[in-house]
Amino acid sequence: MSAMDIIESIISVVKTAQWVDILDILLLSYIVYAVIKLVRETRAGQLMKGLLVCLIAFLIAKWLDMKAITYILTEVFDVGLLALVIMFQPELRRALEKAGHGRWGLNIGLNRSSTESAAIWYDAIEAICDSCVELSATYTGALIVVERQTKLGEQIDNGTVLNAQPSKELFGNIFYPKTPLHDGAVIMRDGMVMAAACFLPKPQKEELVNKKLGSRHRAAIGMSENSDAVVIVVSEETGSISVAENGVLTSGFTRERLSELLQSRLIEPDEGSVLMKATKHISHIAKRKGRDK
């Protein structure tokens, strides 16, 4: 087939394509991109390389008519889908959780009104920031997990339930080195201190984490990988305030920067989401039409 025949075939396909076909191709392209992004630089990436080697070996064995190797690799590929689900379970779980609380998603549940929730979180953020600054000044280690859409019931259950109003004094008592609750994380939900002394999951790529980071920072990275929580760490060695999100740890936070970050994550996200913007826009148009009448 000549190059001209190939071009004519492509043009013929494009001419007969409908909008559903284009949408199908775009969705498939996005899925492939998302899968590549998911497995890149993770344990799944190494597994994918191993599967690619097996596929190449299968094609070569088939071409050379190696019956034994072809049979073995065929049996391997027959259970390949189940094996992929088992091997990639952590990555698949993380991807589905991110899809569930993505910017196109909906918050489903019986929640407080946005005004009431914002007022509660403003007070809680002030308490968190004041506490972190004071703990930083005294080189007292702290680990605070702020729950968002991904519920952390499993971590709350393995700690000591408090369900208390946040305050600088409360955080100071919890993280004081000689108290029973200081060794672990505090988990906050809906502006309240739900539990203390909670154990958090380890990072999924622990071998890639900086060896200089302590157990609190590693736990913060692990928790942020497994959920959309904002995890705040105060180092007992340097007094530095750090924040972990989506598996990434950022250090050197001041009180102002920490307050801005928490407000943007806990108070403003719903107002900035695509669905909320659309709803507000429709509501605004309806109100204008009502005034025009």
Image: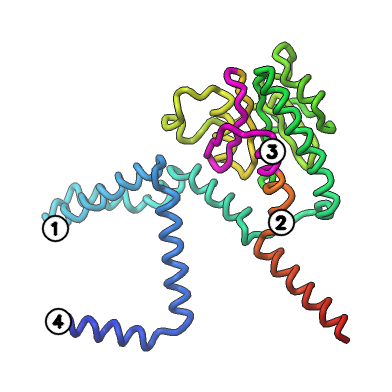
Q: Which class describes the residues within 10 Å of circle 2: few (<14), some (14-19), or many (20+)?
A: some
* Quadrant of image for the C terminus: bottom right
Residue 225: image location, x then y, percent: 55, 40
Please tell me which of labels 3 and 4 falls first in the chain: 4
Nearer mark to the viewer, of 4 and 1: 4
Q: Which class describes the residues within 10 Å of circle 4: few (<14), some (14-19), or many (20+)?
A: few
Q: Which residues are magenta?
A: 237-262
Nearer mark to the viewer, of 3 and 4: 3
| Amino acid type shown at disc 2 | Asp
Q: Dot 1 corresponds to which residue?
A: 63
Q: Dot 2 corresponds to which residue?
A: 270
> How far, Cα to Cα, is label 1 from label 3?
65 Å
Question: As drawn, is 216 to the left or to the right of 198?
Answer: left
Q: Dot 4 corresponds to which residue?
A: 2
Question: As drawn, is 162 to the left or to the right of 235?
Answer: right
> How far, Cα to Cα, is label 2 from label 3?
22 Å
Please tell me which of labels 2 and 4 falls first in the chain: 4
